[in-house]
Amino acid sequence: MPRANSPPPSDGTFEQLTRRFRPGLMAFFLRRVKNHAEAEDLTQEVFVRLASVDADRLQSADAYVFSMAMNLLRDRSRRHQVRFDHRSSAVAQEDAGVDVLDAQRVAAGQQELSVLTAALRELPERTRSIFILYRMENVDKREIGRAFEISLSSVERELARAMAHVTRRVKDEA
């Protein structure tokens, strides 16, 4: 950390540091980022930071300059990772068909759910149970028939009756 009361390096010292370290820093960054413009920016950032450092610290400039460069690379890597994670998350949500929640959509969904619930309550108990088992619990029609001791065609008739009623009620409310 720079000391608050120590002066920054003099212009002559700063020029010497620039001449001495710029080629090495550029090579250091180019090997790691593979982009000349970005290596230039990172090198420039090292020198901007060096301008605010006291002269005492610059006595062991080699280690200090390259540890600063390595820290800049770590910061850059963290920023890129955060951006990548954010983009991946956004793409995953788009791919999953997930939309941003808005109050109107939530209210409309709640209204549709209450209409569906009311329509299911209006069904006879056996028809409602068969419908829920098949449509919501994914139970096979044959298993439902065995459980209610009815034929497969009876299960299909009950399902058709329930679906027609629910569809009619939902359309009436729309």
Image (cartoon, helix red, strand yellow):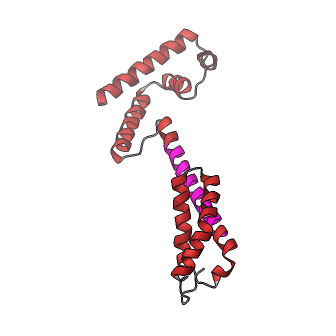
* Quarter the N terminus occupies: bottom right
In front of the other: 31 or 12: 12
x and y, in percent, of residue 47 in the image: 54, 70
Q: Is residue 118 left or right of 26 when viewed as pictured?
A: left
In front of the other: 160 or 5: 5
Q: Is residue 71 magenta?
A: yes
In front of the other: 156 or 124: 156
Where, by quadrant of the figure, is residue 137 drawn? Answer: top right
x and y, in percent, of residue 135 in the image: 52, 25
- Assign the magenta stretch its main secondary structure: helix
* Quarter the C terminus occupies: top left
Q: Residue at x 54, y 80 (%)?
A: 12
Where, by quadrant of the figure, is residue 19 drawn? Answer: bottom right
In front of the other: 155 or 108: 108
Where, by quadrant of the figure, is residue 115 drawn? Answer: top left
Q: Is residue 119 magenta?
A: no
- Residues rendered magenta in the picture: 67-90
Work out whether 153 lies above or below 35: above
Work out whether 98 lies above or below 121: below
x and y, in percent, of residue 8 in the image: 53, 83
Q: Residue at x 58, y 83 (%)?
A: 54
